[in-house]
Amino acid sequence: MSRLNDIRAQSTWKDLIEGQPQHLGFAILLTAGAISLLVASPDSPKIFGLSSAGWAKVSIALALIHQIIVALVFRLQLHRNLLSRWLGERDMIVWRVIFIPLLIARPLSLILTAWADTAAITGIRPSEIVIGLLFLGLSIWALHSVLVHFTIRRALGGDHFRDEIAALPLVNKGVFKYTSNGMYGVAFLGLWGIALVCGSWNALVLALFQHCYIWVHMYCTESPDMGWIYGKS
């Protein structure tokens, strides 16, 4: 019996929701906190019909939709093999088509938020730009490491779909030479970088929200899944 089939033979419906009540609680708290910090400036221009605060709320909604879909797919695939049973060999292709646009929408909506924003962060623009460029450089390095060393199929959660992906060794090149979680720890610094380079308060609030929320995914969804796939250690 394969590793994934063995998991599916042992797990129960209760295992599908492990960590998800916590996920829901954190999502509500982080959303409420982020919205309370947004600044709706009366002189804020509108981009495609929405103000900066409007785009920020869209960005928050897109992040919530993205991570809720990921949690559902990861759990249903890991424990019930749902996508593979429905779609056969096309399962990861379909999943990529769903996942990638939602991922791209996160920085894109943050950029639109920053573009329409008139609320400054500190007003010390040279420092903001230098720090922002540093964060963007680190993020680009991390993304390069993901594409070249970690690979997209693993970043998409391929270890929930294929035994051969779950059996791959740990990556210790690029950013992963220095941290085991270059995607969430380093790549997401790019959101902070965009906010700082643009000098946008609302984009900075979004960066904080999105970075916190991706760690909610890590601890509430991904960490329990890794325990099943790779062992509790």
Image (cartoon, helix red, strand yellow):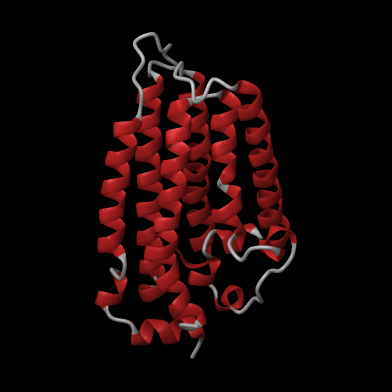
Question: Residue at coordinates 48% horizontally, 50% vertically from top-left?
Answer: 99
Above-or-below relation of 209 to 20: above
Above-or-below relation of 190 to 212: above
Question: Residue at coordinates 36% horizontally, 24% vertically from top-left?
Answer: 53
Residue 105 as seen in the image, left or right of residue 136: left
In the orientation shown, which residue stands out farthest toward the top?
43
Question: Residue at coordinates 26% horizontally, 76% vertically from top-left?
Answer: 13
Above-or-below relation of 6 to 222: below
Question: Which of the 4 quarters of the picture holds residue 170?
Answer: bottom right
Question: Which of the pair 81/14 is nearer the observer?
Answer: 14
Q: Is residue 86 visible?
A: no
Residue 78 in the image: x percent, y percent? 41, 72
Residue 147 as seen in the image, left or right of residue 17: right
Above-or-below relation of 219 to 5: above
Residue 31 as seen in the image, left or right of residue 81: left
Q: Is residue 27 visible?
A: yes
Question: Which of the 4 quarters of the picture holds residue 50?
Answer: top left
Residue 42 in the image: x percent, y percent? 34, 10
Residue 126 in the image: x percent, y percent? 66, 23
Residue 175 in the image: x percent, y percent? 69, 58
Question: Which of the pair 215/109 is nearer the observer?
Answer: 215
